[in-house]
Structures are given as structure tokens and as C-alpha cells.
Amino acid sequence: MAAHSAGKSPGFLAYGRQDIDETDAAAVLRALNSDFLTTGPEIPAFEAEFAAYTGATHAVACSNGTTALHLALDALGVGKGDVCIVPAITFMATANAARYCGAEVVFADVDPDTGLLTAETFSQALVRAGGRAKAVLPVHLGGLPCDMGPIAALARQNGLAIVEDSCHAIGSRDASGAMVGACAHSDAACFSFHPVKSLTTGEGGMVTTNNPDLAARMARQRSHGIERDAARFERAAGAGEPWYHEMASLGWNYRLPDINAALGRSQLARMADFAAKRRDLTAAYREHLRPLAPLVRLPADPPGTDPCRHLLNVRIDFAVAEHTRAEVMHALKARGIGTQVHYIPVHTQPYYVQRYRAQHLPGAEAHYAQTLSLPLFTLMQRGDVERVCAVLGDVLE
């Protein structure tokens, strides 16, 4: 992978892309030249540094954000007969992780403006869950933190575990001032390090938690359920048997290689700069989108929060503009600007319609009808933002 200069943005503006520099490339090269390409020292080092960054006690690295969600739900004992409450606006992996555990999904509606789960929509979903809810998975969509205090209070009152889908939200702070991932209101928080995210390992994920038993379970399950800690063996290892280990449970191969972790450690060292740049670009978008209001709006940050946005997902009234979203996307692409839609409501996907029948969630459907993600990545400059907004204005006219 070639290194890119942070001072020069590419001609075509994708909706998101990685920012790799010489220090990142050097970190990966060091790992390639080491004795370990996987299951080596880069993993615990990355976990310790990530835990310190978020403020959590423990961090468990894994192969991607989906496996992070699966590991967290499994460690919390989610299984057949349980229900997980998932907001309808999210990437499908949030719901799929519950299904991997054998649980059913009740989709919660969301705020139509931000696409976020609220205490009110969570409460409505709890009623539909009929007393079987085991866990709730609030999604910090685009890097905007949910209002976790009321959501957590309602979850604890009803005996639910809380797993934050924080895959978009590394670097964001919630309304309490805590870093997303500190698990101030949850049992675990899950992250993705896909290339379009604010920090990348190529592919990779992480789960943070303040519960040592959850951390130990996830660390074991990510590697076939194999236990190597003699203190946890069910039977004593034979004397002089350094190879001895036990398969304590049926796990998976969800390990993160050392070369990916080395990239993650280098990226984490740059995270303060990444977050500052994303906040500055977001401020530039607010300035340059203002003349397009109310046709185009960037929803306000949730009160008291300080988001590090992964997505610049705006609201466009396509009906008033008399252009379909597809027409707008094609026209922008023809002028060098990539866009994406986050997300098609998961409850409308064929698999879930077949399983739970068609459902009407008005907030999710209203959010989907008007959402469009514009380019946002740290290689961009403020001039790129001005260009995007000017071209968008031309297209909508």
C-alpha cells in the first residue's frame, strides 16, 4: 500500500478513504521483518494502547467489527431464545451478530434526523420484545454518540446487557464527556478498523470492556476457545508439558494478525491529529452548506457531545429538489465526487422481512429517504469541502 501525503488530496473524492503515511508503512515493515506475523507482541501492545486511549480497563483485538460484535454478545451469554434490540439504521452486521448467537432481533425505530436510537424508541422496542430482551446495541451512527445515560438506565431497569456499536465512533466523546469506548454506560463497546473508518488496520476490530471476565472470554473465543492460562485449566497439565492447552469452549478464528496491529498502533499515535482534522472539515461543511439550507442540512451534534465524525451524512429533501437520490449521486460522481447511503433500514432487508414479516418504522424510513454521505477523510482540505458543496448546489439546482 502506497503512502500518501497528508497535504495533498486526491482528484476524485470518495466518501471515505484511508490516510497512510511513511510512519505507518515503517511500522508494518517492522512487523513484517519481525519473528511474528500473527499471535505476537503487537497484539497485546495494541490492546493496551487502545484501552488507554478510550479509558477502558480492557481491550480485545479481533479480525473486524463484525467479529467484535459477535464476541461481545457471546461473552454476555446471548443465545437461543433471547432477543437483541437493534436500531433499524445501521450496517446489517449489528443485527447479524445477534443471529450468529442464535438470538432473535427486534428492530427499534430511530430519530428521523440523526438516525440514532433514543430512549423513547428503545422503550417501544422493549414492549415489542415481550420480556425476552437480553441485550440492546445502541449504534453511534456516523460518529454521533447516542444519549447513553437514559438508554442505559432503561436497559438496567429491565435487566438488559448493553453493547455499544462504536464502529463509527472512535475519537468521539459522549454527553458525559467520556470517550466512546470507555464503557461508562455499557458492558462492552465494539470498534471497526476498516479503511474508511477514522483509524484503520486494513481490516480489524476491537472490543473494550471494564469486565475482566468478559475480556478473558472474548480473548479465548477469538482463538478457537483455546485456554492457555494454567490457572484456568479444568485439569492439571502434565509435568514438563509446555505444549499443553485446553479447548474450553467452541470458539472461532477471529484473530488479528500482528502486521495489522502494527498499522493500528501507528494510526492510533496519529489519532489526535485525525480527530482534529475531521472536526475541522465538519466545521467547514457547516459553513459551506449553510447557503443550501433548508434543502440540505447537516444535523446538529447531539447536546453535550463532541463527535469525531466518520461520516458526513447530510439530509437532502430530494422531493423538493425534484431530483432522485440516484440522479444526484450519478451527477456528483460525473464531477469527481463520490457519495454513499448509510443505511438501507435493516428491517427491510429480504432475510429479515422473511423472518419477521414487513414492519413499518417511520423514523428509520424517513431518515433513509433523505440521507446522503458526502466525502469526509483526513487527506481532504477545506478547499475540497468548498468544491463538494458548490457542486452539490449546482446539481440540486
Image (cartoon, grey):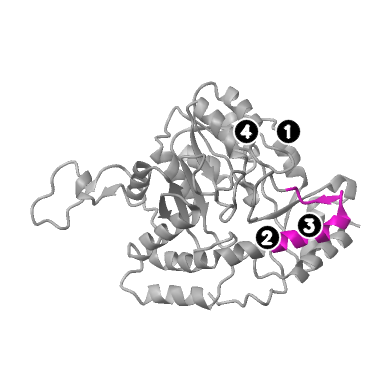
Q: Earlier in the sequence, mark 2 or mark 3?
A: 2
Q: Amino acid at mark 1?
A: Pro
Kindly state the secondary structure of the residue where label 4 is placed: strand
Q: Amino acid at mark 3?
A: Arg
Q: Amino acid at mark 4?
A: Ala
Q: Earlier in the sequence, mark 2 or mark 1?
A: 2
* Residue 335 drawn at (x, y percent): 80, 68
Kindly state the secondary structure of the residue where label 2 is placed: helix
**Mark 3 highlights which residue?**
286
Tell me if mark 4 has few (under 14), some (14-19) or many (20+) residues whose alpha carbon lies within 10 angstroms of its own: many
Q: CA distance from mark 1 to mark 3?
A: 27 Å
Question: What residue sits 68% from the left and 60% below the top?
Answer: 279
Residue 362: image tag: 1
Residue 216 among magenta residues: no
Kindly state the secondary structure of the residue where label 1 is placed: helix
Question: What residue sits 72% from the left and 70% below the top?
Answer: 381
Image quadrant assignment for residue 36: bottom left
**Mark 2 highlights which residue?**
279
Kindly state the secondary structure of the residue where label 3 is placed: helix
* Residue 249 drawn at (x, y percent): 29, 42
